[in-house]
Image (tube, rainbow, N blue to C red):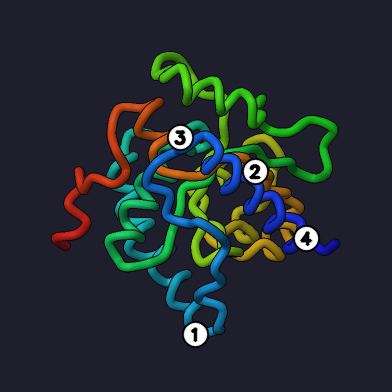
Amino acid sequence: MNNQSEYLGMLQQSINFSKKLEIPNLQWNSIDFKYQTEGEMREIVRVVHGELFDVVEYIFTNYPYLGNFCLDLASIAFMFLSAKGYDVEMIYGNVNVNNSPDDEFDTTSESLKYEYENKINEGEQDIHAWVGLGGNIIVDFGLPDRLKKNYLYPHDVLSCVGDIEFYEERLKVKYKPMLTGTDFFKTTNAYDPLSDIFGFKSK
């Protein structure tokens, strides 16, 4: 099984798990490949590294290190890209770097289920979150700073957006999706990613 098919298998399981938990407002019922041409991917990179990067930089002006803000970063990326008309979904789970014996976060499907069903919205969440775009594309503003700080990755190899092969083959990062849907964020945090609190839809 190649890297992409393994990730997509876990992603479909996370969608199915979210359905089992009856999480509302799921954007994806199954994986639908979109934005697969070179031109479409180039435009996505332009938007993410340009307009969206500027938004993130403005909102997090007072926070030079973004490695601990993946949930809010994923929510903002979801809202921005959704307002642009892209087919996106919020995804929660874990990541492994360089085949480390330990994953980056202490996250399991059952811990996510517990947080969601018990509406836990206090304390720190030991979870990674990212935005899925068109099936096999990932937008992740939180990971690059963690890779620079904890693994001394050089800045010029990092990106906030790429497909599975880019992350797994070039960066040696393995994403492990476990749950999907904006309602998990809404239930365990302070606002709803389906709202337009930043006014992206009017810009």
Task: Pick the residue in front: 104 or 147.
Answer: 104
The mark that comes first in sequence, 3 or 2, is 3
176 sits left or right of 116 in the view: right
Residue under circle 4?
Answer: 3
Numbered disc 1: secondary structure: helix
Please name which of the two marks, 3 or 4, marks the residue nearer to the observer.
Answer: 4
Residue under circle 2?
Answer: 147
Looking at the rendered structure, the kind of residue marked 3 is: Phe
Distance from the alpha carbon under mark 1 to that under mark 3: 30 Å
- The percent position of residue 55, horizontal first and vertical second, equals 30, 52
The residue drawn where x is 38% and y is 67% is 86
Quadrant in the picture for the C terminus: bottom left
Q: Are marks 1 and 4 in contact (CB under 8 Å)?
A: no
The mark that comes first in sequence, 1 or 3, is 1
| Label 2: how many Cα within 10 Å (few below 14, some 14–19, many 20+) | some
Is residue 64 shown above or below 155? Answer: above
Numbered disc 2: secondary structure: helix
Residue under circle 1?
Answer: 39
Please name which of the two marks, 4 or 2, marks the residue nearer to the observer.
Answer: 4
Find residue 82 and report its image quarter: bottom left
Disc number for residue 69: 3
Distance from the alpha carbon under mark 4 to that under mark 2: 20 Å
The residue drawn where x is 64% and y is 43% is 147
Looking at the rendered structure, the kind of residue marked 4 is: Asn
